[in-house]
Amino acid sequence: MKAALAAKVRQQRGVIETEEATKNAFVMPFISTILGYDVFNPMEVVPEFIADVGLKKGEKVDYAIVKDGEVQILIECKKSTEPVKIEHASQLFRYFAVTNAKIAILTNGEMYQFFTDLDAPNKMDAKPFLVLDLNDIDDSLIPELRKLSKDVFDLDSIISAAGELKYIGELKRTLAAQFHEPEDEWIKFLTARVYSGAYTQKVREQFTTLVTKASKQFLNDQVNERLKKALGAPSFAQNDEAALAASVTSAPVADADLAAADGIVTTLEELEGYQIVRAIVCSEVKPSRVAQRDSKSYFAVLLDDNNRKPIARLHFNRTEKYIGIFGADKEETRVPIDSLEEIYEHTVALRATVSSYL
């Protein structure tokens, strides 16, 4: 169900422009299909819920979810075109203190932030303990989300786990940010473990490049291993001289790469797409022979890092995504895709392209 809702969000986000449309298209289906409550039963889901707070009279929170006759969950919605920010949660903060609810949700229909009162009793925390992104679902969170569903609703269990969830989530997001764009402290921390010389400005500049490249290669390797296991592909040993040489990057080479990549941003989605293509064609060649090369207009997947041997091109730098497939004449055919999973639909063509170069 979560996958179906995520697909709906991807397909319809372009035409959802108001808060009401966001609630109808995304939030109500979330309450119904994911949490399992009847959105048309006012004894379970109360829209435009009112609870007077001090001098604030008649203010409303978008939804209150009732379980066993008590308000248990409060939901505040913003339109999908806006990012989710804590500044949008003023009503949630006020209502949290005057109702029995122990869970508050702030959402734009795509991102769902779950709050409770870990820091002070009956006062909503400023930071969520759980963040669900329908565009990038973390499956490890699904069992915790399930505890809030109507059939199970184990509030004590999720509250007891909320502290760990909160800090694990923050740590994961912090690590992701460091992998994407490492900060000086992170660079210095890693440099000190592999370099014994003085940490000068020149060394910092060189290792900024090296840490960034090493992070991307590490993520590539992790994703590739998971994909190979999922596809049942053979695991080739990569200890031959050419593969070893390719895995070693000197500072001068890294500097040259950085200069060449000026203005080019390699996204995680492109890297994931590359790893999917790589995993597909490793039935024909060793994974070490499948290379990537990013440019401003497309992300290329090549055999032997040779421009004359293109396997695929990922055109992700635009609203409509395409995968470029190559035939026997090496002419590119662009095929629109809505998700990375659709790359698997071109398995036969991708393998045939690689086989034609062998």
Image (cartoon, grey):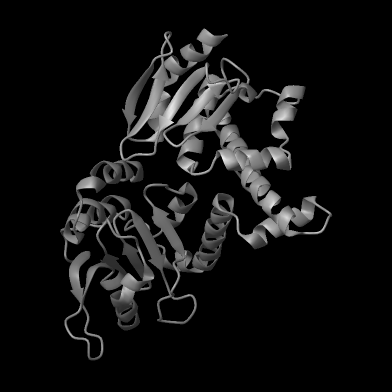
Find residue 90 and report its horizontal and vertical position in percent: 31, 77
Residue projecting furthest to the bottom: 55
Is residue 284 toward the left or the right of residue 143 in the image? right
* Quadrant (top left/top right/bottom left/bottom right) for the C terminus: top right
Residue furthest right as drawn = 196
Q: Quadrant of residue 94?
A: bottom left
Q: Is residue 55 left or right of residue 299?
A: left
| Residue beneath the point at 77% across and 57% down | 192
The quadrant holding residue 123 is bottom left
Pick the front one: 79 or 33: 79
Residue closer to the observer: 246 or 150: 246
* Residue 135 in the image, given as x and y percentages of width and height: 38, 47
Name the residue: 19% across, 54% down: 17
Residue pictured at 58% horizontal, 37% vertical: 220
Report the side of 110 relative to 139 (left or right): left
Which quadrant: the N terminus? Answer: top left
Is residue 298 visible in the rendered image? The answer is yes
Residue 227: x %, y % from top left: 54, 31
- In the image, 98 versus 251, the foreground residue is 251
Between 59 and 318, the one lying in front of the other is: 318
Residue at point 18% right, 85% down?
Answer: 57
Q: Is residue 178 above or below residue 127?
A: above
- How many discs mark residues in the rendered view? 0
Residue 157 location (% of width, % of height): 47, 64
In the image, residue 301 above or below residue 248: above
The answer to whether residue 219 shows anywhere in this view is no
